[in-house]
Image (tube, rainbow, N blue to C red):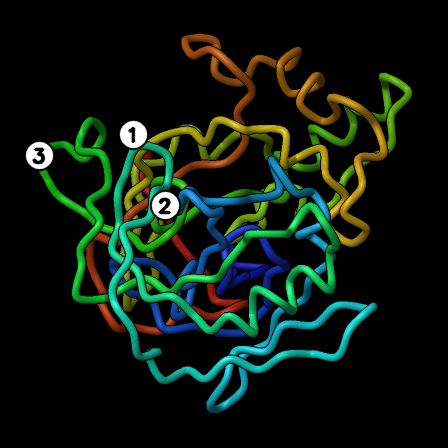
Amino acid sequence: MKITQLTVYPVKSLQGIDVTQSEIHAHGLAWDRRWMLVDAQQRFVTQRQLPALATISVALISDALVLSHPTVEPISISLEEPKGNLRLVSVWSDHCKALPESEAVSEWLEAALGEPAKGVSLVRFATTFTRAVEDDFLAGGEAHTYFADGYPFLITTTGSLDALNNALVAGGNTPVPMNRFRPNIVVDCDEAWQEDGWATIESGSYQLTLRKPCQRCKITTVDQQTGTIPTQAEPLKTLLALNTQPHLKGAHFGQNATLTAGEGGVIRVGEVVSVTPR
């Protein structure tokens, strides 16, 4: 098996950046989920509340994060940490320390997305702070992440997407691309749902341990180019019917993972990986 896609999401819930290689760290791929949008109460804002966030594209250049939208000029945000007081922001039940970006970014967001983005601001994870991953599935170990929902890595496979799309088409629905599931790492695998039986995935320079099936939410119904919902409840409805995790409630696709060896190594598209079974 080999890696066919690597995607970094510098800003939580905005478009991702497909890369050919990335440094791999305990907190995730380099620059992954380093920024996040928050509301006036400092609670995280995602495509669950604002599907149009999917229309904002993201680029990383040598000294800046660049946000782009078809209706406004791009805005550049220095990679140097901003000056200002730390804020306490929330991601689900976690409270994290963050640095606020400038008011100009908030104004840009409102100009791009209109009234729904009023009061939304951009914050950057304060790397002096450590956000622990839930320890229920860590087998006595520990892990941390930045602004990801819960785990530093999400792994999916081409075989599982093919199986889901076959089921969607059989039900009279349109197939969906992999970006609906916003994975970090996609592995080429002929058989569906094989990742659910893997304990680890590794190359010569790193090892990832698969910890927990990823329960999916309504972001999977959002077209990641247009920010619209083409078919209500799909592909969630079909995933529920496939019941890939019969012992768990909800729809699941992909596996959450942590880095267990190889801090600071490099992961590459095209490299061959091996897996160990649970």
Q: Left or right: where does residue 84 sit relative to residue 181?
A: left
**Amino acid identity at mark 3:** Gly
Q: Residue at x 78, y 54 (%)?
A: 225
At which x and y percent is residue 114? 75, 54
Q: How crowded is mark 3: few (under 14 residues within 10 Å), some or many (20 or more)?
A: few
**Amino acid identity at mark 2:** Val
At which x and y percent is residue 68? 70, 72
The secondary element bearing badge 1 is classed as loop
Q: Mark 3 points at which residue?
A: 140
Q: Which residue is drawn at 48% across and 62% down?
A: 122
The vertical placement of 214 against 5, above or below, is above
State the mark number for residue 62: none
State the mark number for residue 275: 2
* Foreground pick, 127 / 101: 101
The vertical placement of 62 against 264, above or below, is below
The vertical placement of 241 against 273, above or below, is above
Q: Residue at x 58, y 60 (%)?
A: 5
Q: Mark 1 points at which residue?
A: 278
In the current view of this chain or complex, which residue is farthest to the bottom? Answer: 62
